[in-house]
Image: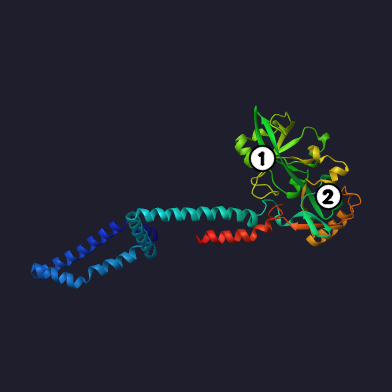
Amino acid sequence: MGLLSRLISVFRQERLDNDLEDEMQFHLEMRTRDNAAGGMAADEARRDAIRRFGNTTLHKERARDADVILWLDDAWRNVKYACRVLLRSPGFTLTVFVSIAIGVGANSAIFSCVNALLIRKVPVKNPDQLVRLEWAEHLPDGRQWTGMFSYPVYRDLRHAGAAYADIYGVSSEAGYLTFGGETERVECRLVTGNYFSSLGVVMAVGRPIWPEDESEAGGMPAAVLSYDYWKLRFGGDRSIIGARFRLGAERTAVGAEYVVIGVAPRGLDSANVGTLPDLFIPISRRPQFRDGDDLALRAVGFVQPGGRLRPGVSIATAQATLTTVFQGIDKGEPGHGGRYAIGVLPASRGLYSRTEDYVRPLQTLQGMVAAV
């Protein structure tokens, strides 16, 4: 029999058994007729036919083994037997299904965290070239690391280190978006003009934020919608490009007017693992990130820098060079006398700076739920 016929026979066992039984009886009847035609009495003719044919049960088993996929047939029989046992014990059956549901749900939830923090890379071009920047100050009680820079310090570091890395900046804030007479709270990712070009992403619709969008001379503030927000809020309508909305810090505030210039690709967010922004806007359009050399602005950090290393530049080279540059930048703390260092760390999985803190706990949890 062909493979398809054997596969079908696994799930049509009653019909297969009936066909085999009919075939066996046919052969016995033919032998009995031949014996009777040779002069045997009817009873003797039947007995001789059975004796010559042999063990009918054994012949049936051999024929079944040839007509089905044996291992699949055994598995199907076991499944049917298990179902009969479960139906006879509803309490035990409920316990089994609840245990399976808890195990599958827990495995799925923990693996989602493991994938987001430890496995999945940022969906951009050559993610292994991406890095994140932290800085540290040598203090009497040891080096203190932080991932946040002030905007003026970030700007100086970006210009001074341009030969070694294309450094972009990211920050976050919540706001209230008003469009079509409706106001809702949104999560905003504030990005520098080279954010999308540094990541090397291909926009789903429209264009990305460009460096000229950071300047007030560039006209109306531009905004890029996240893919999920575009689908949820605007139904994936491509004509949203060019639409205008207002974005305020409070629900009752009028806010500034923005124009939609593009839609980011699905899943793009190199800043925070596990959270997706609703829209991206130029960072320097916000008051706390204005250009300038005010000491107060230089001393307060709101910007998380990331970047893409230039071809041929290693992390060690970039770290040594950027540390030298950083030590010479005014940080708004005259007379502090601290010695500073830059940490250049891989960021293929995003700018989240504490991934390593969760490696062992997540591995332990994954092992526990897998055992369940």
- What separation in Å lies between label 2 and label 1 (alpha carbons)? 26 Å
Locate residue 72: give its quadrant.
Answer: bottom left
Q: Quick one: which residue is furthest to the front in this view? A: 141
Q: Circles 2 and 1: CB distance less than 8 Å?
A: no
Q: How far across and down, in percent of the image, does residue 272 sit?
A: 68, 49
Q: Is residue 143 above or below residue 200?
A: below
Between 321 and 363, the one nearer to me in the picture: 363
Q: Which residue is mark 1?
A: 278
Residue 230 visible, this orientation:
yes
Secondary structure of the residue carrying tag 2 is helix
Residue at 38% x, 56% y: name it.
92
Q: How far across and down, in percent of the image, does residue 297 sit?
A: 84, 43
State left or right for residue 339 relative to residue 33. right
Specify the amino acid type for callout 2: Arg
Specify the amino acid type for callout 1: Asp
Q: Which mark is residue 290?
A: none
Q: Which mark is residue 158?
A: 2
Q: How far across and down, in percent of the image, does residue 151 sit?
A: 82, 45
State left or right for residue 210 relative to residue 295. left
Residue 314 visible, this orientation:
no
Secondary structure of the residue carrying tag 1 is loop
